[in-house]
Amino acid sequence: MGVSLRRRQVNTSQLSSDIADTIQINHEAFLQKPPLFASLRSFGQSTFGLVQHGVQHQITACLITASIWDFVMVRKYVYVFFGCFLLLLSLSLSVACSGGECTYDSDCEGEKFCQEGKCVDGIVGNACTLNTDCKTGESCISSKCIKVECTDGEQTSCYEGPTGTIGQGTCKAGVKLCQGGRWGWCEGAITPSSELCDKLDNDCNGKIDDDPLCTTTCNDGDSRPCYTGPASTRNVGLCREGKELCTNGAWEGCSGDTKPVAEKCNDNLDNNCDGNIDENCGDCQDGQSRACYTGPSSTRNIGECKEGTQTCAGGKWGQCQNESIPQNETCGDNKDNDCNGRVDELASCNQGCTDGTTRACYTGPAGTKDVGVCKGGGQLCKNNKWEACVGEIVPTTEICGDGKDNNCNNQVDDNCGVCRPGSQEACYSGTTGCTKNGNVYTCNTPCSAGTRTCKADGQWGPCTGETTPAAKEICGDNIDNDCNNFIDDNCNTKLHQPCQTDTDCGTGNRCVRASNVLQICVQECTNDPTICNKNPKRKVCRAYTITDQGQQLSMCAEEASSGQSCDFSKSIMCKSNLVCDNGSCRAATYVNEGEICDSTAATPVLCALGLTCVSFGNGRPNVCLKLCSVANPVRCSRSSFSCMPFQTGGQVGGCIQTTCTQNSDCVFTNTPHECVSTSSGGKLCVSSTSPGTATFGNICDNNTIRCQAGLTCLATSSTAANGFCSQDCTTSGTCPTGGTCTQVSTTQKMCLIPCTTTCSNTQFTCQTIGQLGNFCFPN
């Protein structure tokens, strides 16, 4: 058969087309993995339950009644008596049809309390005047002890999106405010939505515009609908799509869309785009006030009793403030304390006293004397009657901010909200752009803090006059629109995009190889390292070898420390002496030209800048070689070196010593090299394998089975699994026993084992080797 002999340890490029493909590039950048550029878009549709269980029963009852009533009306002259009966039945169902839940507390189950026709959870129902009348965990609201979840005015962060999405992309937490002892709605939170191709991570999965529809290129003048609000609100209520235009081959961002805002009560519009109009608006409009009175109705505005006022907040009426309700009658003060229309009417008030005598007195509610600012006074007997109590201090409305317990409930400044009414302070509602130190904000221009004023209910009003960051940078206006302290950042639309040549990347960028299959655009800083200072993250000007050109450039990069994530496709590079392995930085050692390199070692051994790790195959160790261009091999400065391509016909290669006659001619003495012959008759210095133990005539594979020093593993072809240990020769007399010196090429002779039909070594067979004859080779 026509088989040509191959020396298994000779394995480099352009020396012979049959061994060129075995030399491989093993460069630092090739440890990177190409990014994924595609994902599947999922479209969700929300459904709404139309009828709840209890309401469904009411509607059913009403329909049944209406049907029977119609039946009776048609036959009213025949079924008069039965019609009267059904009329009573319809009246008994009127409550269900009208939607009212209760009239009295007894109409509600368990510990619910009837408030304005509704059974409210958490109302214990015990009558009270002060918070001290209630159990622990309850407050006195509208003369009833109510279980509270929180303190009025208290705020807490909230988030209702999927676990792991908060803080990713556009997703952020909101705030809940406590009103009337209950937590309100979660306001200001942003949860995941469908990817909108707006250069933001809308679905909060850590990837920007990871959707097949988010193409990065387009034709100028093209437009497409867009929407930057939550996907479920698109074209619902007031929310409407916008339009995105194509400019300079790229989508410029969504404009003109209308997104959800907080529901505005009583405007008959669906402001928050959830399909409901004026929902959760409560019983009143915020800021409304009305007269109120929690005492017995017969005592309202009688004697010392006076009605108060209550204000609407969060759609609910607040506590009745500044009212006076009946107290125990105080003899001698000439007042109608119990508001029954009579002054000092008690029998005990008519007992005489001796003029000039005095006694201690206190007219405040029981349990408030000597609590807070409250204290007793004294009375003087005159004309055999006790005069008014003098010098006492009774409970008054709490004065917020004075540090005193004015209403004598053993709590200082209680129910005062979070601020003193009328006070002002600096405020800022943005999440970026300004930082707060104490009460002072430091902002990146043009962002600025505003001012908020404390309302009458002790809650802060809206922040006015502030400037928050724009949704995205407006490229070319020389303004830091997003207030991140970098002007016109994120305007490099070509950065990290796939490319073929530098012209694909635009001004200031270069096209470099990021992996074996991917080339991307990076920002070059070779001539101006300070340009990296304008980037929020890529602040370091890092040198990088362009493997396709055999030269170096510097690029703006973000540096990662040991254990941190790295991704060359995003310009995230490991710091010096670290290598990016499987997306994580770890320690590495760098070596010079001609030295052994191994990126798979526990501590990777990598080539210094400007070198690449080259494999000669056949079990030989990898070594660092200088990169070069076949068309311009000037980088191979040594006279005995040539630029040998890594692939047949390729233009990029490594500087390899091609002039030698014996091993000692190889210049890299710090790493064992040997001078070997090629099938084309040339000589080449390649890295030496550590010698094995196989002797002449025995099987070898240059991997687990290697020949002794001075012997060569010879096989019938480069793809053969095994060969046998042979050696160079001049005559048969220089071959070991059983060997014959045979001319295997025009310039080389080697010792072969001749045969006729069989071989003494049962692992070998007698094979015809071209025109040379029959020789023993492994099966």
Image (cartoon, rainbow, N blue to C red):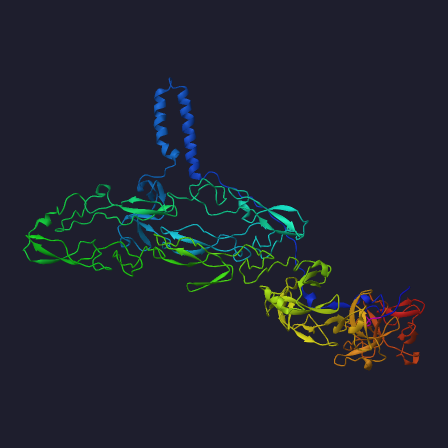
Q: Is residue 79 above or below residue 26?
A: above
Q: Judge left or right: residue 37 versus residue 344.
A: right
Q: Quadrant of the N terminus?
A: bottom right
Residue 68: x percent and y percent? 41, 25
Residue situated in front as seen by the camera: 434 or 342 = 434
Which is nearer the eye, 529 or 205? 529
**Toward which corner of the image does residue 108 lie, by quadrant?**
top left
Above or below residue 677? Residue 651 is above
For residue 8: magenta?
A: yes
Q: Is residue 573 visible?
A: yes
Identify the magenta region. 7-11
Figure label count: 0
Tell me if I can see residue 700 in this picture. Answer: no
Residue 326 left/right relative to 167: left
As drawn, the residue found furthest toward the top would be 77
Q: Position of residue 94 (x, y in %)?
A: 36, 32
On the rendered structure, is 630 left or right of 283?
right
Percent coordinates x, y for residue 203 in the rendering: 57, 52
- Residue name at image x 5 percent, y 56 percent: 355
- State whether the magenta stretch is mostly helix, strand or loop: loop
